[in-house]
Every structure is written in structure tokens, then in C-alpha cells.
């Protein structure tokens, strides 16, 4: 079977190609990719090429498929896995397979497995490690967002607390505690707001900060104070750029008790230091934002570490259980990570989007690999709809869902593009 895919040959060398897949092995699965969301990690791999720890040194002669946040449909199952997987079922992928300690991962290391492709062959190790996950949701794009959402879920789980004199960590955020999401109106921060409000282990107070009123207002439209209250959470949005003393302002919302959990969503030293300054006794700061500078550092109050039991943690990615939790909550309608998506495009948009990702404002860029469409901002649908009936329909469907991408919009897009 032929596939069309974007493969990496070297630094800044991505190529969209059509080629033949090898015959399916008895321990392999043939699948169709429908959606892939482009991650900053793919940009890093593209600009580093073989210098990236997951990209093979010989990618110039043995190129690999990029994209690791993908969802699709199983087409054919090799004999070994027919007891567990069925043709026609939807799937999502946990890319951190860690097979026998290897760093190999889809989207970086595999010749025939990656998100920016039409058809792929999923090798045995994905099933052996339980990283090929069933997905029962209606819309494929949610399956693509399960991976970034799992990183957020993992952050909530890896955060910890401890009682004085007890040398056992209590994992997870403080239930009924004070919770701050700093620089939190971006795409991943949006996911954190959603999960904080709707997961079973809830804080009492959630405070979201940013320095951009438009981003904060958009977040407040999607995750309302009223919905949070209905779920037992007091929610506040604060522009720390508009107040004279951000630390005092944030502390006042806790009656100066401080925050049990602080998540930092921007690799900016003043934000990290602000998070440190508002920690409560036994407060935990999760540094979520991945810096590109390997020497990034910030001040941390070690007096409070000693006497106030404050501490810090971080996580890069989530595990398979985190993905399963994300998928289940999306299937049940408890999470809606569509707030992460700001742009939609087709396979022809993959290369320019990946190579220019840091310069494209907004949140997640969603790709449908079976169609051709330039990367298009959801905010531009209305204007484009004046001359294009498809965009007029997509604009209507998104506006009916708080301006968010949704399952009906996905169906309308695929129906129109695949018919042509």
C-alpha cells in the first residue's frame, strides 16, 4: 500500500513524499492516520535533525516520519494481535513507548510510523508496551489531543506534598487547596484550567494569571467562573501586568495563606520567582514549561525550602495511564481540550507549519493528513466564509461551540475535502 508522509532527512530538511509501505508482518498493524496536532517538539527535531536524541544519525539515507500526536483508524491487524485489536476501531498513540529502554519514538525514529502520514505500519513494540490505545470518541482530533492533555494530567499527578515528620510523599495536588496557574492562558494552560475544574481531585481555589487581557478574556469565556462554581471551585483570572504588586494581589486571594500548588507555564525567570514567592507551607511548584535554553535558571527561596517545606517538581510528558485517563474523560465529555486548537490545515501545511512554528501565534495547529488545506486560523473563518461556503459553514459550527473547533466542524471539513 502507498502512503504519503512528511519525512525528516536532516536539519531543516522535511520532505512530503509518496512511497510504498512494506508488507504487513504478523506482529504489526496497518492503520490510517486522520489527525495529528503539531507539537513544538517536532519543530525541535526538525531544526536539530540527526543531532536530536530521538532522530537516527542516518536519517539522510533512512528518513523517518514526523508527528507524534495522532489519531486514526485501524485497517488491518497481523495475526499476533487479532485477539486484542480490530479493523475499523479508532486508536490513539502514547509516543513515549520506552521499549527496552530505547529513546525511539513515533514522530522521530520510525520509517513507517508517525503522525504526518496517510497510512502507517505500527510495529510490535507499540502493542507490547500497551502504547496503542483504543479510542471511542466521535471526533478524531480529541484523540490527537490526548497526548498533550496527558502531559497536563501527569503534572497534576507528579506534584506532591508531605506531612511534617512523615517521610512519605502524598502524590497529587492538594485536594481542597489553593491552586495557581501562572502564565496560564495559553493552549496548555487552558488544558490545566479544564482539568483543575473537572477532575475528581479538585482544589478549592484556582487562580489563572497572564499579562494579555485578550487571552485571559478568551479563557474566561471558555472556562467560566459560573461553571467552576458549579463544580465546587472558586475561579479567578488575574492580569499580573496590570497590578503594582502581583505577589500581594495573588496572596490576597488566599487570605495571605499562599498556594498549595503553583504551576508555571512559561519559562521566564520572573514568573518562576513569582511562583516561589506565593507558595504556602509545604507548597509545591510544578515547572511545566520546557525551556529551549539548557542553562535556564531562576532564583528560589531556600529559607522557605528549609523552614516552610516548599519544593519544586517537573515532568516532561505523561505516561500511558495519564493518556488513558485523558481519553476516558474526553469520551465522557468531562474534558474539552478543543480550547488548545487555534489553527487547522491539511498535509500540505505540515512542512511550513513545523519549520515556522515558533513564529505562528496562537495555540495548537491541527492537521488532517488526508486533505489539502493551507494552515488557517479559526479566527479567520468568518472573513474567508464571505467567499467560500465551506469556511462559512465551519465558522457557523465553531461559533455555535464558543468559537472552538469541534466534532461537527471536523465532519464537515472531511466530508467536503474528501469528496473533491
Image: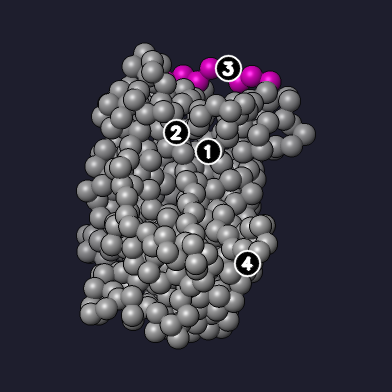
Rendered residue at 41%/28% (across/down)? 53
Which residue in the protein does label 2 denote? 107
Asked whether residue 20 is drawn in magenta, I would say: yes
Residue picked out by circle 1: 95
Label 2–label 3 contact, CB within 8 A: no
Q: What is the distance, in whole Å, between disc 4 and disc 1 at their CAs?
A: 38 Å
Q: Badge 4 local density, few (<14 within 10 Å), some, or many (20+)? A: few
Q: Quadrant of residue 242?
A: bottom left
Provide the secondary structure element on which disc 1 rests: loop
Image marks 1 and 3: residues in contact by CB distance under 8 Å = no
Please report the residue visible at 44 percent of the width from the left and 44 percent of the height from the top.
36
Q: Are marks 3 and 4 in contact (CB under 8 Å)?
A: no
Mark 1–mark 3 distance (CA, rounded to whole Å): 23 Å
Residue 209 in sight here: yes
Q: Which residues are magenta?
A: 19-26
Q: Is residue 114 left or right of residue 161?
A: left
Mark 3 or mark 4: name the one nearer the start of the chain.
Answer: 3
Q: CA distance from mark 1 to mark 2?
A: 8 Å
- Would you name the residue on which mark 4 appears? 164
Q: Nearer the viewer, residue 213 or 352?
A: 213
Q: Nearer the viewer, mark 4 or mark 1?
A: 4
State if disc 1 and disc 4 touch (CB < 8 Å). Answer: no
Amino acid at each position: 500500500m502507498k502512503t504519503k508522509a512528511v519525512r525528516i532527512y536532516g536539519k531543516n530538511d522535511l520532505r512530503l513524499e509518496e512511497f510504498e509501505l512494506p508488507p504487513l508482518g504478523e506482529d504489526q498493524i496497518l492503520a490510517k492516520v486522520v489527525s495529528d496536532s503539531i507539537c513544538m517538539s517536532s519543530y525541535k527535531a526538525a531544526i536539530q535533525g540527526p543531532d536530536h536524541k530521538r532522530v537516527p544519525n542516518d536519517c539522510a539515507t533512512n528518513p523517518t516520519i514526523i508527528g507524534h500526536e495522532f489519531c486514526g483508524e485501524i485497517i488491518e491487524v497481523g495475526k499476533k494481535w487479532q485477539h486484542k485489536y480490530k479493523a475499523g476501531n479508532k486508536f490513539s498513540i502514547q509516543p513515549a513507548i520506552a521499549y527496552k529502554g530505547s529513546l525511539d519514538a513515533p514522530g522521530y525514529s520510525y520509517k513507517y510510523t508517525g503522525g504526518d502520514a496517510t497510512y502507517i505500519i505500527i510495529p510490535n513494540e507499540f502493542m507490547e508496551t500497551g502504547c496503542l490505545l483504543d479510542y471511542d470518541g466521535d471526533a478524531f482530533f480529541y484523540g490527537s489531543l490526548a497526548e498533550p492533555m496527558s502531559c497536563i494530567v501527569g503534572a497534576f499527578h507528579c506534584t506532591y506534598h508531605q506531612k511534617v515528620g512523615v517521610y512519605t510523599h502524598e502524590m497529587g495536588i492538594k485536594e481542597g487547596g489553593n491552586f495557581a496557574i501562572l502564565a496560564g492562558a495559553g493552549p496548555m494552560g487552558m488544558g490545566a484550567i479544564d482539568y483543575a475544574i473537572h477532575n475528581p481531585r479538585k482544589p478549592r481555589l484556582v487562580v489563572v494569571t497572564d499579562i494579555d487581557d485578550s487571552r485571559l478574556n478568551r479563557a474566561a469565556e471558555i472556562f467560566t467562573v459560573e461553571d467552576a462554581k458549579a463544580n465546587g471551585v472558586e475561579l479567578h483570572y488575574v492580569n499580573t501586568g496590570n497590578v503594582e504588586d502581583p505577589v500581594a494581589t495573588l496572596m490576597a486571594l488566599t487570605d495571605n495563606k499562599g498556594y498549595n500548588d503553583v504551576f508555571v507555564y512559561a519559562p521566564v525567570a520572573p514568573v518562576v520567582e513569582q511562583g516561589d514567592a506565593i507558595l504556602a507551607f509545604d507548597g509545591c511548584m510544578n515547572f511545566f514549561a520546557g525551556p529551549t535554553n539548557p542553562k535556564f535558571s531562576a532564583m528560589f527561596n531556600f529559607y522557605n525550602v528549609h523552614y516552610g517545606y516548599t519544593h519544586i517538581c517537573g515532568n516532561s510528558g505523561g505516561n500511558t495511564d495519564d493518556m488513558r485517563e485523558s481519553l476516558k474523560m474526553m469520551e465522557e465529555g468531562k474534558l474539552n481540550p478543543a480550547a488548545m486548537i487555534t489553527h487547522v490545515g491539511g498535509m500540505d501545511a505540515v512542512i511550513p507549519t513545523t519549520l515556522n512554528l515558533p513564529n505562528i501565534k496562537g495555540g495548537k495547529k491541527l492537521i488532517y493528513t488526508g486533505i489539502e488545506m493551507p494552515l488557517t486560523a479559526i479566527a479567520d473563518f468568518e472573513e474567508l466564509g464571505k467567499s467560500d461556503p465551506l469556511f462559512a459553514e465551519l465558522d457557523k459550527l465553531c461559533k455555535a461551540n464558543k468559537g472552538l473547533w469541534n466534532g461537527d466542524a471536523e465532519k464537515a471539513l472531511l466530508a467536503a475535502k474528501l469528496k473533491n
